[in-house]
Image (cartoon, helix red, strand yellow):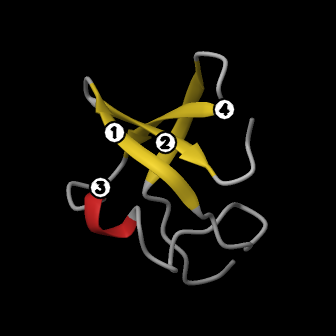
């Protein structure tokens, strides 16, 4: 994982439909949320079905997360 920069921390689960709340670590995180450069800790691509503002955080729904 050398060369990767964390853009957010997972804060908690949101609701019952598979969303998680992310706390942004960078000011310019929004363009990265829909890109192929967004990965999980294991290096696999993180595909998001949805992303929405949630206060100072961002609520996202990863693909296949119910």
Asked if labels 2 and 1 touch by Cβ distance under 8 angstroms, the answer is yes
Q: CA distance from mark 1 to mark 2?
A: 6 Å
Asked if labels 3 and 2 touch by Cβ distance under 8 angstroms, the answer is no
Position of the N terminus by quadrant: bottom right
Name the N-terminal-most of marks 3 and 4: 4
Name the residue at 60% across, 64% down.
47
Q: Nearer the viewer, residue 45 or 41?
A: 45
The residue tagged 2 is 60
Q: Nearer the viewer, residue 37 or 48?
A: 48
Name the N-terminal-most of marks 2 and 4: 4
The residue tagged 4 is 18
Q: Secondary structure at mark 4?
A: loop
Name the N-terminal-most of marks 1 and 2: 1
The residue tagged 3 is 26
Name the residue at 33% across, 39% down.
52
The residue tagged 1 is 52
Q: CA distance from mark 2 to mark 4?
A: 9 Å
Q: CA distance from mark 3 to mark 4?
A: 24 Å
Crowd band around label 2 with a 10 angstrom C-alpha radius: few (<14), some (14–19), many (20+): many
Crowd band around label 3 with a 10 angstrom C-alpha radius: few (<14), some (14–19), many (20+): few
User: Picture coordinates of residue 53 (x, y %)?
Assistant: 28, 35
Crowd band around label 1 with a 10 angstrom C-alpha radius: few (<14), some (14–19), many (20+): few
Q: Quadrant of residue 58?
A: top left
Q: Secondary structure at mark 3?
A: loop
Q: CA distance from mark 1 to mark 3?
A: 16 Å
Name the N-terminal-most of marks 1 and 4: 4
Going by the picture, which residue comes out furthest to the right?
42
Q: Quadrant of residue 39?
A: bottom right
Asked if labels 4 and 2 touch by Cβ distance under 8 angstroms, the answer is no
User: Picture coordinates of residue 12 (x, y %)?
Assistant: 59, 23
Position above or below: 63 against 58? below
């Amino acid at each position: 994982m050398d060369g990767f920069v964390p853009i957010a921390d997972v804060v908690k689960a949101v609701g019952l439909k598979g969303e998680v709340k992310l706390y942004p670590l960078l000011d310019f995180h929004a363009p990265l949320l829909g890109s192929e450069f967004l990965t999980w800790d294991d290096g696999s691509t993180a595909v998001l079905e949805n992303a929405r503002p949630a206060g100072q955080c961002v609520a996202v729904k990863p693909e296949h997360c119910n």
